[in-house]
Image (cartoon, coloured by chain):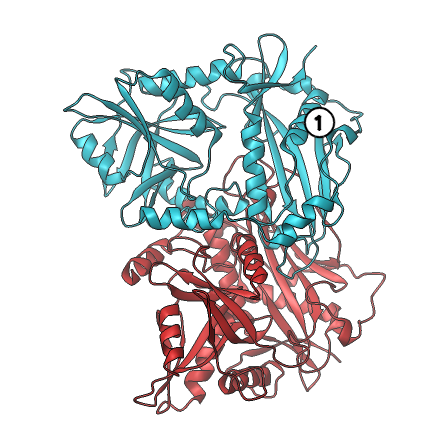
Chain colours: A red, B cyan
Amino acid sequence: MMLHRQAISSRMTRMLPSFVRSMATTETPLDASKVKIIKTNTPSKAQPNDQLVFGKTMTDHMLTIEWNRGKGWATPEIKPYAPLSLDPSCCVFHYGFELFEGLKAYRTSDDKISMFRPDMNMKRMNKSAARICLPTFESEELIHLIGKLIQEDKHLVPEGTGYSLYVRPTLIGTTNTLGVSVPDKALLFVICSPVGPYYKTGFKAVRLEATDYATRAWPGGVGDKKLGANYAPCILPQLQAAERGYQQNLWLFGPEKYITEVGTMNVFFAFQNKETGKKELVTAPLDGTILEGVTRDSVLALARENLDPNEWEVNERYFSINEVADRAAKGELLEAFGSGTAAVVSPIKEIGWKGKDISVPLLPGEQSGPLTKQLASWIADIQYGRNKHDNWSQIVAELK
Amino acid sequence: MMLHRQAISSRMTRMLPSFVRSMATTETPLDASKVKIIKTNTPSKAQPNDQLVFGKTMTDHMLTIEWNRGKGWATPEIKPYAPLSLDPSCCVFHYGFELFEGLKAYRTSDDKISMFRPDMNMKRMNKSAARICLPTFESEELIHLIGKLIQEDKHLVPEGTGYSLYVRPTLIGTTNTLGVSVPDKALLFVICSPVGPYYKTGFKAVRLEATDYATRAWPGGVGDKKLGANYAPCILPQLQAAERGYQQNLWLFGPEKYITEVGTMNVFFAFQNKETGKKELVTAPLDGTILEGVTRDSVLALARENLDPNEWEVNERYFSINEVADRAAKGELLEAFGSGTAAVVSPIKEIGWKGKDISVPLLPGEQSGPLTKQLASWIADIQYGRNKHDNWSQIVAELK
């Protein structure tokens, strides 16, 4: 099974057809220096931090860039936030030509605005675009443009640990025809929403339902890409789990019941071998069915750098709900958490499986385990500029 | 494998969560009698038949119906065709909350306009909607509204066998938030495009590439629903096949290499057992990974009614590319064709598999096999009202 999955994945990433490649050489590349800025006449005031709702209020400006096959990227525009006007036959409404990214901008202690590893998001966005034949672009140019967009609305980047500006780059196909074909027009837009901490009063560990009747992703599919296609189908299983008292689905795969992701996040488990005493932090490998999470990558890197290798192993490997159930029964399950941009880490306290709940240990009187808490703290220190780590934090705007 | 797939499929179709169910009882149902009609001031002239391009030119009017959770369906509006204005945070752009139907309206010989089995499309549209938590509706009401829409643009329904009005009902989620959640707002719209025959000069048999490195649909997924999510991911494999000289992908599934669909159509194969002389028409079973095609269903019904059961078996069963290759080598492969609304039937002449081409027989000097041709003719006779079959043809508007 493992070999089969990996073989499919690598064959899918073969080079793009030549006509798609050849376009790239004759088209105008994305160029941040050409940006045209039209400022709003009615700048808004920042909402109080305690009234921020994730993704509900947007900032005053948006970035839009049109693309046409043969011509390439048009002049980037930063302009007042406004509705999009699209023909009803536009391919984004019919055939799922859409993808997005999610990343955050933070106020640092020295009055700058930084983004966390934006190069990773741009790389993934280009991979998503190539997979559904939408145009790719120079990552650095889009990061630069996002910086300019944030600069316009810098007064709306909230202050305080846990507060940030959520940035949503989106790319949609805009060809007007009902024929299913490669889009010859596209629109890249970026909108921003000031957001608070995912858990307002500290962590709140969640209950998951291990789900095998609905399947999030499949070898040879697109589960590793941030496409709209991967999201709508996951809502019904979530409602079904919620009816049974679980907040999210723990997505299983195949007859082996491998653990893949949780809700819209990657997922980590920590075990301790009772005989050897050795601990292990584990997450599913990137085999084409797993989103290449930036937080996932950061957790792995920080764990590998900071955890004592005599005490810990950090592994990307297949592991099943049956292994989790068995090791929980033996007292070998230490912790479990989801990882993603919105919540950074999201501790798990129980997993429903085969009519029973597997308990995941938490610190006494707290809502997370010690490693989960430690990882969250390491990441926050980098995001808010308190720890310079490998240029993970990139300054994109200035407050003063 | 077969049991596993069917078990997953039936578990996925369990009832909707209670809060989704309960809404239906308190919300305003879709009501065609309330329709508000705003006529265009600039009615267009019909294009000459030879200039019609599939899905490129739309008629003068569109139907739109808004939906709000708790309120239900608003007043249906038939109004001049115009762009949609949507907030950039609208969930249709980010999370794939979109689904559609495709059906055709025909001028009958007695000056009426009929649709082919619209009840089947409405049933499927409701299934698609329920799967991604968009609102469902009373099928008869939407058919009635589509009739009224066509009535407004009846001069644009082209005349002649092979010509028709392609009707595209679409349902999108319109909630404005970046949080991934159940949409509380939606828009149902219907647009129409006058279209000519898929094959302007009679059939043109296609070459397919049997594709196992990309997977169109899987158990526990949404491949049986007409969601936008199923389309964009299939374009890159099609381009890759085109580079190697094949027009479409023949989608395979699993280690058994089962044949599932072709391009965006269902697929049929005809075999003859050399020993018994018995013929078989076969297509993949509806196990949750196969689109419940209206043309597929019609082909099966007409074949079961009209083919001599002493000569033919008509089966929905799993069959693999290996079976096709083996039987072609033995001279047992008779015909193969895709089925769908756009082309009705689409004959296949060659299938690339493991570096070789499997030849599919055609009538001497023609571009289809005899059964393919016969089925196309039976269906056309019903669509254009020359044969009344079980009310498959439903009058929805009057020309005079």
Specify the amino acid type for callout 1: Asp
Whole-percent x, y for residue A193 in the image:
70, 66
What subunit carries mark 1? B
Q: Kindly indicate the quadrant of the structure image that contains residue B49.
A: top right
Tell me if residue B368 can be seen.
yes
The furthest residue to the front = A355
The residue pinned by badge 1 equals B60
Q: Position of residue A36 (x, y in %)?
A: 71, 58
Q: How many discs appear?
A: 1
Q: Residue at x 37, y 32 (%)?
A: B267
Decide which of A267, B388 is in the foreground and name it. Answer: B388
Q: Is residue A359 left or right of residue A256?
A: right
For the N terminus of chain A, give its image quadrant: bottom left
Q: In screen coordinates, is A5 left or right of B96? A: left
- In front of the other: B353 or A331: A331
Residue, far top: B110
Query: Given the current orientation, which residue lies at the most extreme right position?
Result: A42
| Quarter of the figure with residue B372 | top left
Question: Residue B181 placed where, x, y %?
Answer: 63, 58
Report the quarter where the C terminus of chain A lies. bottom right
| Residue furthest out toward the left | B275
SS class of the residue under badge 1?
loop
The picture places residue B104, in percent across and down from the top left corner, at 56, 24
Is the residue A200 above or below the residue B125 in the image? below
Q: Residue at x 52, y 68 (%)?
A: A208
Graded by Cα atoms within 10 Å as few (under 14), some (14 to 19) or many (20 or more), the crowding at tag 1 reads: many
Residue B201 is at least partly visible in this image: no
Identify the image quadrant of residue B51. Answer: top right
